[in-house]
Image (tube, rainbow, N blue to C red):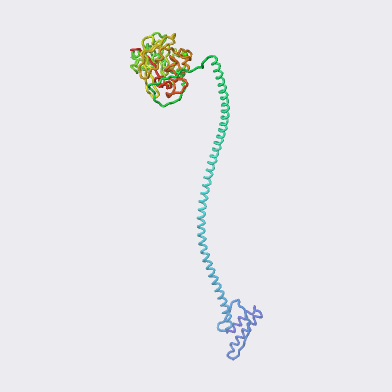
Amino acid sequence: MFYRSVACWVTKRGRTMGSGTWSLFILFGLALWKANGENKKCSYTFLVPEQKITGPICAARGYSTDKDRVTRLDVAAVRDLLSKQRREMETLKLVVDVDGNLVNEMKLLRKESRNMNSRVTQLYMQLLHEIIRKRDNSLELAQLETRILNATTESLRLASRYRELEAKYAALSAVVNNQSVLIGALEERCMQVYSRRHEHPPMGPPLVQVVPENIPVNVPRFTNEIQRDNTRGILFYSMMTTACFSLLFFLLSGPFRDCLEAQEASHSTSGMYLIKPDEAERPVQVWCEQDIDNGGWTVIQSRRDGSVNFFRNWDNYKSGFGNIDGEYWLGLEGIYNLGRQGDYKLLVELEDWMGKKVYAQYSSFHLEPESESYRLRLGTYQGNAGDSLSSHNGKQFTTLDRDKDAFSGNCAHFHKGGWWYNACGQANLNGVWYTGGVYRSKFQDGIFWADYGGGFYSMKTVRMMIRPID
Ligand SMILES: [Ca+2]
């Protein structure tokens, strides 16, 4: 049966096999025949060339040992191949494991990358914000620079202007110097001419040498403030108020002979009144002091703030000037007319710059007529200011344009006022109103009362007032 199977398989394959194949099968058939003939004690030996088997192996178990040997070699080779592939698989597994780690690391790296991106974005925003802020700062800096440039330009302009002014000042100084030289030369020329005409150059009056018993205590000041000539506005106001008061008094009562008569007519309030002395041609305004020493005092002179210039001519002193409610001079003619209608006494009220008030009272007071240049007639002194007026008793009135004093020059020029100057005097109540008390001047032209403060102490307020003798 086996033979038939082989023959059949050979027949089928014989159509496609070559001569080599046929030889192989012949040898294979002879071998089989030998195996069957062992029983006949006959043996054959075949030498078959070894060839590599690449295709499927068809082995019949239990029939051929050579054929089993070839198969084992192949199996060993396959095993080698398998072990090799197993190692490669292990290697690949290791590689896969490594790749897994790499994947994890990659994930971590991605996560870190995302974090880094977020951080980078945040930093970018911060950088953007910083850039914007710096741009704003740059704008402010630019504005500041512009301002600095403007200020620098302005300072340069001012410096240039200052240099120009300096140059002008230098030129003016040169002019002044030249003028000074010229004035000096002219003065020298005048002195030469004057000395040819007169034996002696003009001298000022002797200074007051009286050492006062009462010296005002105050801080020495040397301001020599010039009198303010703001009388125009005040005069307008005074004229208006005067007109109102005049109308009022004419309608209601008065004019009175003096302030005592006004007081006796129940006008006990100090203020402006209209009086008309008996011999006066027309009424005049005065300030009536009804509050001190029983009242009834007609104020003939008042100084208190330097608002009125007292360095005036004869006509002004004759008719009077100033403001009734401020500084004023009643007028020599008015004072003369008052004195003609009775016996009057004089009260001089003085206030220093510490606010202390002193007084000097004279038992009688009147003036002689204009033909006698309003000569002063005084009674005896009484008071606490010192007697600085008795030396003027019997003296005529002197103004800058009418010299009636006992001095070779005009005392009014030196003392800058109008007064019953002697040569020149111990009192100058119509002088220059200085602030602060002590003043500096070449001549004693302040409002001084020599027995109170000396000749270089200018009083703060002064009032001269008269009242009929009781
Ligand atoms: Ca004189």
Towards the viewer: 178 or 75: 178
Q: Residue 24's x, y, as percent?
A: 63, 82
The quarter of the picture where residue 300 lies is top left
For residue 11, above or below residue 99? below
Kindly give the residue lying farthest to the right in the view shown.
19
Instruction: Inspect this view and state whether residue 276 appears.
Output: no
Q: Residue 277's x, y, as percent?
A: 39, 10
Towards the viewer: 156 or 19: 156
The quarter of the picture where residue 455 lies is top left
Kindly give the residue lying farthest to the bottom in the view shown.
40
Towards the viewer: 68 or 460: 460
Q: Is residue 327 left or right of residue 9?
A: left
Instruction: Inspect this view and state whether residue 266 appears.
Output: yes
Q: Is residue 70 left or right of residue 427?
A: right
Q: Residue 225's x, y, as percent?
A: 46, 23
So how many labels did they put on this image? 0
For residue 203, above or below residue 160? above
For residue 158, above or below residue 371? below
Kindly give the residue lying farthest to the front in the view shown.
199
For residue 102, above or below residue 328? below
Quarter of the image where the N terminus is located: bottom right
Towards the viewer: 142 or 324: 324
Q: Is residue 195 left or right of residue 384?
A: right
Q: Residue 320's x, y, as percent?
A: 44, 14
Q: Is residue 262 left or right of residue 14?
A: left
Quarter of the image where the C terminus is located: top left
